[in-house]
Amino acid sequence: MSQRIIHGILQGIFLAILLTGCSRPYLPPDGYLPHVIPPTDSCLTPWPAGETPYHLRQTVFLETQGQTHVLQGFMILDVDRAEVRIVGLSELGMKLFDLKVTSEGHDILALAPTLGANGERLADQIALSTRRIFLSHRDMADAEAHLGPEDLLLIDRSQGSPVVQTCDPRKGQVRRVYDPKRRWSVDFDAYQPMNGFTGPGRIVYQDHRAGYALTIVLHEVFEP
């Protein structure tokens, strides 16, 4: 990953902070009514608790500034402890980073010298995107619920900026998580059997303000 690409991502993040300001409270779209029946566990998270930790192997496509970069990743996802251990490799197999991410913060366990002076700031952004993709569901059990024509809408306001999650209640599958104020979103699709449960085979994360996107293709959920 070149220094120019890293600089571009970090510049977008800085602009996003400058542009974040006051906005109107988020309201559900027309046609959604308050829903008092508690959602099923599968509508709260695509990662069933009690089955963890999950060991995942994945390919990540980073799209930024009109270019696509391919990374390989190995992950341990512990839903019960709200913790992720993620190791990123270059396309040629060189270890780029090793991070431990929780809902509160992250620890940098290893960074490749090739990432340069901005390596730690890049690790901060990797941790942020990991937290949004894999750990943003933990507060949905207490979220507002609204039922629409085709999906169930959950709104978590506990973090200041609202985080919205949509679920297909007929299939019991989380489809999208997004923050309309900070303008990031995560889409889950291609659900398939994965070593004892049904999970998303493809995840697309977009940070519209920072100007990049990640497409994660899950190849395998394996036993350690």
Image (spheres, rainbow, N blue to C red):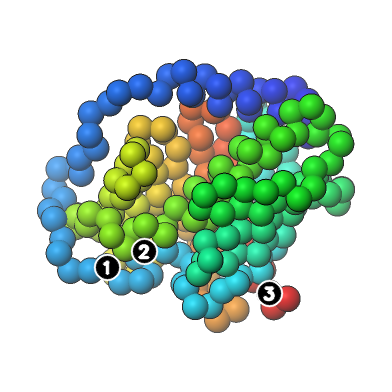
- Marks 2/1 in contact by CB < 8 Å: the verdict is yes
Q: Nearer the viewer, residue 82 or 204?
A: 82
Residue beneath the point at 41% across and 32% down: 182
Figure quadrant of residue 56: bottom right
Label 2 and label 3: CA atoms lie apart by: 23 Å
Q: Which residue is mark 3?
A: 222
Question: In the drawing, does residue 25 fall left or right of residue 208?
Answer: left
Figure quadrant of residue 211: top right
Question: In the drawing, does residue 219 fall left or right of residue 170?
Answer: right
Q: Which residue is mark 2?
A: 44
Q: Nearer the viewer, residue 176 or 45?
A: 45
Residue beneath the point at 30% across and 72% down: 40
Location of the C terminus by quadrant is: bottom right
- The earlier-in-sequence mark between 1 and 3 is 1
Type of amino acid at the residue the image marks with label 3: Phe
Place of residue 219 in the rendered image (x, y in percent of width and height, measured from the top left): 67, 64
The tag on residue 69 is none
Q: Which residue is mark 1?
A: 39
